[in-house]
Image (tube, grey):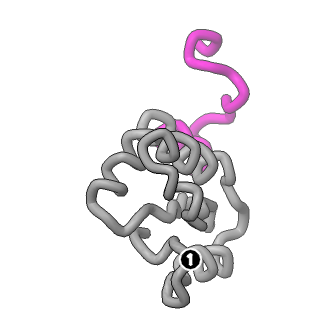
Amino acid sequence: TTGGTGLAKRDITPDATLEVIEKEVSGISEIIRSESFKKTNRAILSRGVAGIRKESLIINLPGSPKGVRESLEIVLEVLPHGIEILKGQTTECGRNDDEIR
């Protein structure tokens, strides 16, 4: 999802996401906020969440194209592995790539 993650009254995306997800994946939203804070201190005002619904991963991203791009750059490397786990294609989660090889 994109947009609606701020503090304004109309920003309800995280609230709606929490209503539909089965499990929260807080590490995704935490790292997006943490890394984004290095570029703008306003990043801590984001209420974006991430979570799982069935075999889908839902991530709340900022509303601006630049914010979306920067956020995806932060998490893109690990998303394929997360999708593999959701689809039951792997169970390796607690090891890094060097340990698996």
| As drawn, 37 above or below 55 | above
Question: Residue shown at 55%/83% (left/top)?
Answer: 12
Question: Residue shown at 50%/58% (left/top)?
Answer: 42
Give residue 1's quadrant in the image.
Answer: bottom left
Q: Left or right: 18 with respect to 46?
A: right
| As drawn, 18 above or below 39 | below
Crowd tier of the residue under label 1, counting other residues whose Cα lies within 10 Å: few below 14, some 14–19, many 20 or above:
few
User: Magenta segment range?
Assistant: 79-101
Residue nearest the viewer, comparing 7 with 101:
7
Give residue 99's quadrant in the image.
Answer: top right
Question: Residue shown at 55%/64% (left/top)?
Answer: 46
In magenta stretch: residue 70: no
Residue nearest the viewer, comparing 80 with 64:
64
Residue 73: give x, y in percent of width and height. Answer: 37, 40
Residue nearest the viewer, comparing 46 with 55:
46
In magenta stretch: residue 82: yes
The amino acid on which the numbered mark 1 sits, given as a three-letter code, is: Leu
Question: Residue shown at 49%/89% (left/top)?
Answer: 10
| As drawn, 13 above or below 47 | below
- Which image quadrant: the C terminus? top right
Which residue, as the protein is rendered here, is positioned at the far bottom? 9
Q: Kindly identify which residue carries mark 1.
A: 7
